[in-house]
Image (cartoon, rainbow, N blue to C red):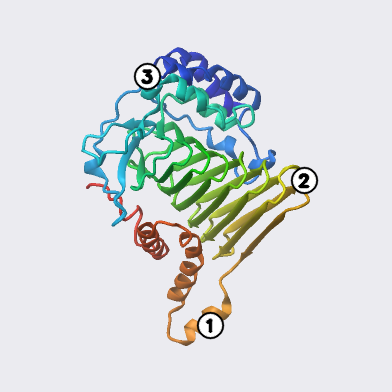
Amino acid sequence: MNSEKQYIDLFEANRDVISAHSTAVMNGLREGAFEDFKRLGFPTRKTEKYKYTDISKLFEPDFGLNLQRLPMPINPYEVFSCDVPRLSTANHFVVNDAFLHPTMPHKQLPDGVVITSLCEYAEKNPDLIAKYYGKLASTAEDGVTALNTMLAQDGLLVYVPRGVKLEQTIQVINILHAEVDLMVNRRVLIIVEPQAEAKFLFCDHTFDDRHFLATQVIEAFVGDNARLDLYCMEETHEKNVRVSSVYIEQQASSRVNHNVITLHNGVTRNNVTLTFRGEGAECNLSGCVIADKKQHVDNNTVIDHAVPNCNSHELYKYVLDDESVGAFAGLVLVRQDAQHTDSEMRNQNICATKKAHMYTQPMLEIYADDVKCSHGSTVGQLNDAALFYMRQRGVSEKEAKLLLEFAFINEVIDQMDLEPLRERLHHLVEKRFRGEFDRCEGCRKAQ
């Protein structure tokens, strides 16, 4: 319990400071989360869901925390240029775990749409936040979610009211910035009301050459006949640890596309838990990972078909080089009353070296009898026949491998509905395979 003890002692010594710099709605769940964390602790490899990543070890170092909410001076508009060409995104910045109010004019959002500090909005509209905050992210079942809930002091709120369709993609740029090794506990609440539509691109970046530990909890509520596209891209560095948990609830006839892309990282654990609450809903979960050196990427998904007549589709692909480690575990749960479920899960992986390791565990748990469900997983190397064919036609071995890896990973990117984003990611993935950049090419750090 050494890892847990430092956070238990930290909270007990600073609970008043933590609460004073937050809001009543968030504080209302804090003590319960603390009790759950003391009971659960961090998951270990003995926990089935976490057997491929030693979470407890990641939290052992003594990271600093900005509990006093001291300002971290940075002007992201001068430091980063994150507009994906022709995507015309509206940029919003989160520095560590605090929403940064725009200093440059934005295109005005439709009436009623809110993108702001979770803490500030809760002070003025506590009833709306209390209706949703913490309702999906159960602290009773996951120790890291409990830790995030007991320490998080602010976050990002996205609210799209009934019937509003956002034509412009919203880009949220998360920047980790500190002069010392830092732990950040980020919270995101997304509410898409019935008949509303929204597209989001979340980008994670590290500004400083420090060790960072970031926990993130995203709760997304998608109403009847609503649509949410949530694209998440990590472009950090090898000193970064990221533990992200995304909780999504879908109502009747809603549509969700969730895509997570890991291009640069240190150690990453991504959890996605999606629950169907209304009939006729559909989701597409996808992800791609490019890892080398000693990078570690672990994706874990749970899709809960709690009602009939819903469709789910999953596709995750990994390309692992050097001594990198990848893991994927996906569970599709079809409950007894969830008849006419249609579900497909695929996980395909390439290990480019003998020292790269991939662990994969697709699972189906079905209690209904009138369903159509399938799952599959493959781990292999590049196709020798294809390599030979390309070599015979004058393509170098290095270029042939790159082209095959590029084609392999592009199936995930091609599923995205945003054409400009697809084109940009094709370019970034190719450059990543060529080793030509260390950060997102569209997000340049000022020198």
State the SS at label 3.
helix
Q: Residue at label 3?
A: 124
Local crowd size for mark 2, using a 10 Å CA cut-off: few (<14), some (14–19), many (≥20)? some
- Amino acid found under the numbered disc labelled 3: Lys
Q: In this view, does 4 lie above or below 419?
A: above
Residue at 21% from the left image edge and 42% from the top image edge: 78
- Amino acid found under the numbered disc labelled 1: Phe
Q: In this view, does 350 lie to the left or right of 443?
A: right
Local crowd size for mark 3, using a 10 Å CA cut-off: few (<14), some (14–19), many (≥20)? few
Picture coordinates of residue 312 (x, y %)? Answer: 61, 52
Q: Tell me, for residue 367, which label it has, or none.
A: 2
Q: Which of marks 3 and 2 is nearer the N terminus?
A: 3
Q: In this view, does 61 lie above or below 306?
A: above
Q: Tell me, for residue 388, which label it has, or none.
A: 1
State the SS at label 1.
helix
- Amino acid found under the numbered disc labelled 2: Tyr
